[in-house]
Amino acid sequence: MLKQIIASRAPKYKQRVRDIPVHILPFVSSRYATLASDQVNLSLNFESREITLTGDREAVGEVVGSVKHMISELESSIISIKMSLPQRQHRLLTGGYADDIMKKSNCSVFIGQGAEVIVWGHSPDLAAGLTAVMAQANSKYTHEFALPGPVELSKQLATYFGRIHLDRFIKSKHDVETFLPSPQSESESLCIELVGDKPEVDASVKVVAELIGKLIGGIREVSVDWLLHRVVVGKNSKRYYFCRGYPTDSFLMQVVG
């Protein structure tokens, strides 16, 4: 009882394991949860490539040692193999798709330069990893829809599509995953990527094309005094972007503050 009282009142100790190599992260992610206990909580941040551990000081120290040993062991035991795949298929090898490949083959996949795809894993697993990557890359139809230029117009369209959540709308209508380009992209050409069964993707392409046709000539950038920004953001912005969940034909407006 005394130990329980002390444990409940003692301050939590925090420590981080930083700079985990990017190709090691997926393997650490699949294993690190097994190191958690009643005394230690772990959280993995992919963006900063670090694990944060909190809990009892002594227990945290032991788990930190285990995590570092795991990383060192992985660095010395996994190898990579490179292959080439059309860039239009790369979308099917990222995010949740990459997680599925890891679960099926115990191998991770990364996108390299150009058409290059890199598969990491233990030597006995690489054959299964390559098979899983090829199966995933060919599992769905992908289409890249280039937004019309010049690039200023492309960025305006990308901003608008993000505001109206075009990806959610297409998903609800055609069960197609839509990946919108970032308006902050430095690329000279922005593309919407559509992934799914070909008939559904084709129907989604038609939706996007029709919407762009209505938007051409219908977007303006206006300067708004910063004191008035609160009037056109938040819940008020829905008046400009939505009409029953879909953009209106008669009033399409983009406000850039």
Image (cartoon, grey):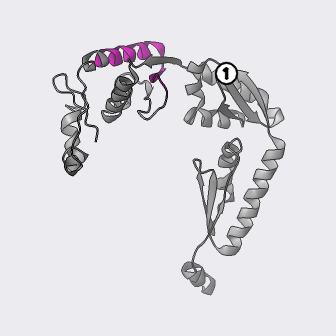
- The residue nearer to you, when weighing 154 against 152, is 152
In the image, what residue type sits under mark 1? Met
Above or below, 212 relative to 12: above
Above or below, 196 relative to 120: above
- The residue nearer to you, when weighing 126 against 87, is 87
Q: Position of residue 154 (x, y in %)?
A: 38, 24
Quadrant housing the N terminus: bottom right
Magenta-highlighted residues: 187-211
Q: Which residue is mark 1?
A: 134
Q: Quadrant of residue 218?
A: top left
Please check the rendered image and state whether residue 198 is part of the magenta-colored stretch, yes or no. Answer: yes
Residue at left offset 80%, top offset 40%:
78
Residue lying at the far left of the rendered structure: 250
Please check the rendered image and state whether residue 218 is part of the magenta-colored stretch, yes or no. Answer: no
- The residue nearer to you, when weighing 76 against 107, is 76
Above or below, 95 relative to 199: below
Q: Position of residue 16 (x, y in %)?
A: 64, 62
